[in-house]
Image (cartoon, helix red, strand yellow):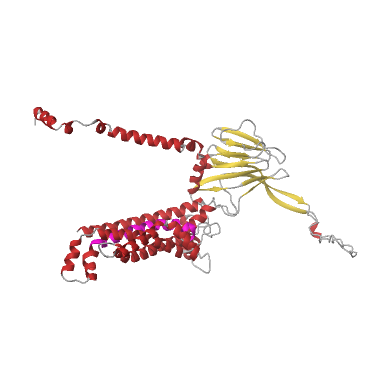
Amino acid sequence: MNGYDMDLIAARHPALVQQSWTSRLRIPIVIATICAYFLFSFWFFAFGKVFQGANWDIAGAYLADWVSYEERPEIRLRADGTMTVTFPNNSALGANPHPDWLEKDERTITRTVESNAADTVAKPKSTISFMAQPAEAKPAADPTSAPKTVTETIVDRTIVTFSPGTSIEATPELAIIRHQGDVLEIPLGHDLPVRAKGQLPAWASQPHIDKKIILSFGLTGWAEIDSDRIKIRNRFFGWANFFFDTNSVFFGKSLSDVASLMVSGERLDPKMSNFERAANDILYNPSWQHLDVWTKLLQTIVMAFVGTLFAMVLSFPLAFIAARNITANSLANQLTKRLFDFLRSVDMLIWALFFTRAFGPGPLAGISAIFFTDTGTLGKLYSEALENIDNKPREGVKSVGASPLAVQRYGVIPQVLPIFASQALYFWESNTRSATIIGAVGAGGIGLKLWEAMRTNSDWENVAYMVVLILLVVYLFDTASNALRSRLIGGASR
């Protein structure tokens, strides 16, 4: 086709080669509309102020809590001018911690302590009395109230190292903080106000005058310095004591030592073997509660499976009643479809709240919530699939004189069974995730365990552990469900 032919076509059909101005501006108008919508949303929801006012430091510390833990020693100044360093009872370092990141100059002293002889509590006197009260006898001298000699260990100087270049050096008179090349000095003393020497750097803040100073060292931790104490929060990556708690006989041992003890080591407990003792300490670890978490996770899986199975079994016959081409009764069709609408119009979480109130907290409430919601949704999907079948196979079966039940069995079910099974598998996979959410409102399973850990606002590593388990289970179920659906649909296509 040459240019002359093109001119002839353009003369006869100008619309083919010349676009109208609306057609030419269609794409720019769509792009301008989308940009205007996003600009309006940015202004209407004040995204700029929201992002500017967000506390990103808290968000970073919150995320760090998922994959790390804190050691929280406290340095105290005593009235006699000495210091002590104490760890909390639940420290991940055990009952007698000596970490390498905390250096102490210690010495042992012997001092005399005056005992309080007035330890006895006087009997209360009546405010109104009409009889003479006998004179109270003075308590006899207690030989144990004599001065006592006490030997104890005190600390003259301590250095806490958070990371290379970040440390706190403390003596009874002064705290020296080093971070990012800055040096901050804060005098200490019971009767002294908290005042730093010089201006506070950007990583230090003092919300109230002469009160505690807060030091923020980023992901490595933070500290609070008061006139008579220093609170340390030193952060470390990982999950502390994930296998063995501080009370376990295997605590602090390397993996090779534990394996050697489990295989050929001397028995640590006469009542059980070392292998049984190690398994018992792992499963009943009080910090991580592995056995309880795994049990709750299995409860969630079973809850999702049973609820989906019951919904699939009930929605299957109801879908035949709701399908207009299967059941020629408009009243039955409408009643069944309205039942499906009612069941699926109420969210699964709301059903879970209802059944938790009715049956009490536990898996039964979760199973019932999944069963009700999925019966409505699967019933609707199944009935729509039935209404869109090919009528020729059904008519062929009917033409040979088959009964109505046989017509459905051989003319309808083979067409829709792969679709039904595929949808049921998808809902089973989806309900594994949903069962975690409804468990948080009292329906049992790992959702309730997850909510309890989140409420403490301190056990975020436990939250991360359960989230990882949930993600792993959902991934496995998703993979298995996709494989089964592919085989069902592939088998139907062949």
Q: Is residue 197 left or right of residue 289?
A: right
Q: Which residues are magenta?
A: 415-442
Displayed quadrant of residue 142: bottom right
**Would you place residue 191 above or below residue 261 in this image?**
above
Q: Position of residue 295 (x, y in %)?
A: 45, 62
Q: Position of residue 320 (x, y in %)?
A: 29, 64
> Quadrant of the image for the N terminus?
top left
**Would you place residue 201 above or below residue 236 in this image?**
above
> Quadrant of the image for the C terminus?
bottom left
Q: Is residue 140 left or right of residue 428?
A: right
Q: Say which residue appears at 54% left-offset and 36% top-offset.
A: 165
Is residue 154 one of those drawn in magenta? Answer: no
Q: Nearer the viewer, residue 258 or 235?
A: 235
Displayed quadrant of residue 173: top right
Q: How many marks?
A: 0
Q: Say which residue appears at 11% left-offset and 28% top-offset.
A: 7
Q: Position of residue 339 (x, y in %)?
A: 37, 62
Q: Nearer the viewer, residue 58 or 269?
A: 58
Q: Nearer the viewer, residue 200 or 380?
A: 380
Prevailing secondary structure class for the magenta stretch in the rendered image:
helix
Q: Say which residue appears at 43% left-offset and 53% top-offset.
A: 468
**Would you place residue 143 above or below residue 18 in this image?**
below
Q: Is residue 429 left or right of residue 446?
A: left
Q: Position of residue 256 (x, y in %)?
A: 46, 56
Q: Nearer the viewer, residue 155 or 432?
A: 432
